[in-house]
Image (cartoon, rainbow, N blue to C red):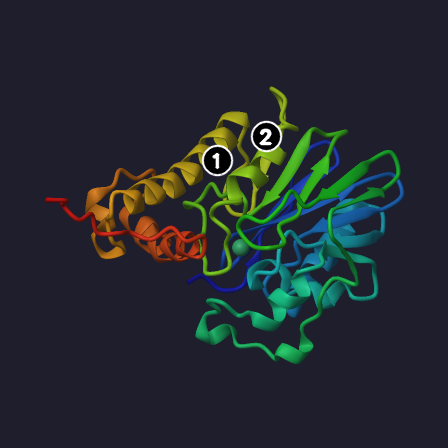
Amino acid sequence: MPESSLSPFVELRPGVFRAIAEPEAVTIGLVVGSQGALVVVTGSAIAQGAAIRAAVETVAGVPVIAAVVTHGHWDHVYGLAAFADLPTYGHESVADALRTSPLDLPDDMAVEMESLVAPNRPFSLAKALDLGEQRVELVHFGRGHTAGDVVVIVPGADVIFAGDLLEEANPPSFGPDCHLRDWPAAIDGILGLLGEATLVVPGHGEPGDRVFAFTQRAEISALYGQVEYLIGQGIKEADAYPAGEWPFDEATVRAALPLAYAQLAAQGKVPRTKLTLL
Ligand SMILES: [Zn+2]
């Protein structure tokens, strides 16, 4: 795993920048208006949050006036304390996520849990921010990658930060806190906003377009649908991988299978042995 580091900010569209924070190659966004700047995702440690803040003060040319986190995973939110004197936005469930995290924190990233902070302006559905001639909308389209994914929409620049609802560098991350059934509907919220030229910036990886977002939505939906079909055929979890057709690589599918089986079982959908009637 690479060391903790922060790449330079690169301008994607006028007033919208992106940097990459290691060790998890997380997208850090910066939206600049005439009056202030918004940081999108605060990195994986408090020191990294401070480094992000120092870097954006130079790039933006206006004061940083707020930060937003796209969800409660450590690599996106643990730097939030470096912005605690500003309004910080995120879904209302992020505070819970911080209490139950770390989900898969590397050993050498151990942190003092007491030093972590949740967004001080939590919200349930949507917020609009005015940065001065640059409006930003923060929207929760429902559960997906986590219970509290927030999408950051910059209409004037035609850019959307999707958080980990979409990933480009790797397949989507199916962790124990994801909601497989609801996830495609959350991406539908994004798809409804996309035009020909909209830039879709994933939580990890390179920005993409409408086709990228449509494709990943279809793949996540297909994964869940395939498991539902196999359960209907009486196929147990242990036999599912070789029995199915999958949109992702084997490791990704095998990580998702226990989650999909458990989430479908919670809806009463379990493989039943078919008895031959004589
Ligand atoms: Zn995540």
Q: Is residue 214 left or right of residue 244?
A: right
Relative to 222, say whether 242 is above or below.
Answer: below
- Kind of residue sitting beneath label 1: Arg
| Residue density around tag 2, few if under 14, some if 14–19, many if 20 or more, within 10 Å | some
Mark drawn on residue 191: 2
- Kind of residue sitting beneath label 2: Leu
Name the residue at 56% across, 54% down: 146
Spatial CA distance of label 1 from label 2 is: 9 Å
Looking at the image, the residue that sits furthest to the left is 278
Query: Helix, strand or loop at disc 2?
Result: helix
Q: Residue 176: x, y in percent?
A: 46, 61
Q: Quadrant of residue 126?
A: top right
| Residue density around tag 1, few if under 14, some if 14–19, many if 20 or more, within 10 Å | many
Q: How many marks?
A: 2
Q: Quadrant of residue 44?
A: bottom right
Q: Residue 87: x, y in percent?
A: 83, 58
Q: Is residue 88 left or right of residue 244?
A: right
Mark drawn on residue 217: 1
Is there a contact, CB below 8 Å, between mark 1 and mark 2? yes
User: Could you tell me which quadrant the C terminus lies in?
Assistant: top left
Q: Earlier in the sequence, mark 1 or mark 2?
A: 2
Name the residue at 45% across, 75% down: 107
Name the residue at 55% across, 36% down: 207
> Is ligand 1 within 8 Å of the beta carbon of the residue shown at mark 2?
no
Q: Nearer the viewer, residue 2 or 173?
A: 173
